[in-house]
Image (tube, rainbow, N blue to C red):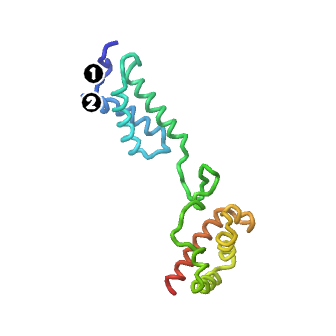
Amino acid sequence: MSARFERFNMQINIDNSEQIIDAYMPLIKANARKFSRFEYDEMIDESKMLAIEAICEYDESKGSFGNFLKLKLLYHYLDKSKIDPVNSLDDLDSNGQAIIDTLIDDFDFEEMLFNKEEYKSLYKAINNLDMKDRKIIMYKFFYDMNLAEIAKVMNISYKTVANRSSLAIKNLRNFYKLS
């Protein structure tokens, strides 16, 4: 087989990469539609970059360029599909811990507890919360429980604990802004 690609009658080299990408655009678009899990426009751009890599890596012994490119795209996106995207802060990380529990907050309630002047206002702010929210805050910050443990103890869903926790913290912050 010659270095010329019969279907499009062009050399497979970096000098004519634009023409090659244009010629294989139907393959690139079909691949982007096949993996609808990813953003279509981003896949098109990423596939173009993969096509340029394929042009640089291609030699005649690897068969036709079309099949080489098709397999390169397929294997790339199959590998990429193995990685689970984070869809929610309630999802678990690789250690099995909720992502929301691993976030670092610049507002440290524990530090505030040790400050005697702030202690009274924190106590007042916590007492202004709804009873369920108060329990969640107590479990989370005083007993150092994660959201899954709190959900189990309170016999409510994990999602409810996560939502109520973030709303309670927001209410505490608003209380401190007003005081």
Picture coordinates of residue 8, whole percent (x, y): 30, 22
Please give left or right for residue 107 compared with residue 28 in the image.
right
Q: Residue at x 58, y 61 (%)?
A: 100
Residue type at tag 1: Gln
Q: Is residue 46 above or below residue 166?
A: above
Q: Residue at x 60, y 84 (%)?
A: 116
Q: Residues within 10 Å of mark 1 (few under 14, many from 20)?
A: some
Q: Residue at x 54, y 43 (%)?
A: 83
Q: Mark 1 — residue?
A: 11
Tag 2 or tag 1, which sits nearer the N-term? Answer: 1
Picture coordinates of residue 3, whole percent (x, y): 30, 17
Query: What is the number of callouts on the image?
Result: 2
Please give left or right for residue 13 compared with residue 120 in the image.
left
Q: Is residue 33 above or below residue 87?
A: above
Picture coordinates of residue 179, whole percent (x, y): 52, 87
Dot 1: what SS? Answer: strand
Picture coordinates of residue 176, whole percent (x, y): 53, 82
Foreground: disc 1 or disc 2: 1
What is the C-alpha distance between the residues marked 1 and 2? 10 Å
Q: Mark 2 — residue?
A: 19
Q: Residue furthest top?
A: 1
Residue type at tag 2: Gln
Task: Decide which of 113, 179 is in the foreground and name it.
Answer: 113
Q: Residue at x 71, y 66 (%)?
A: 156
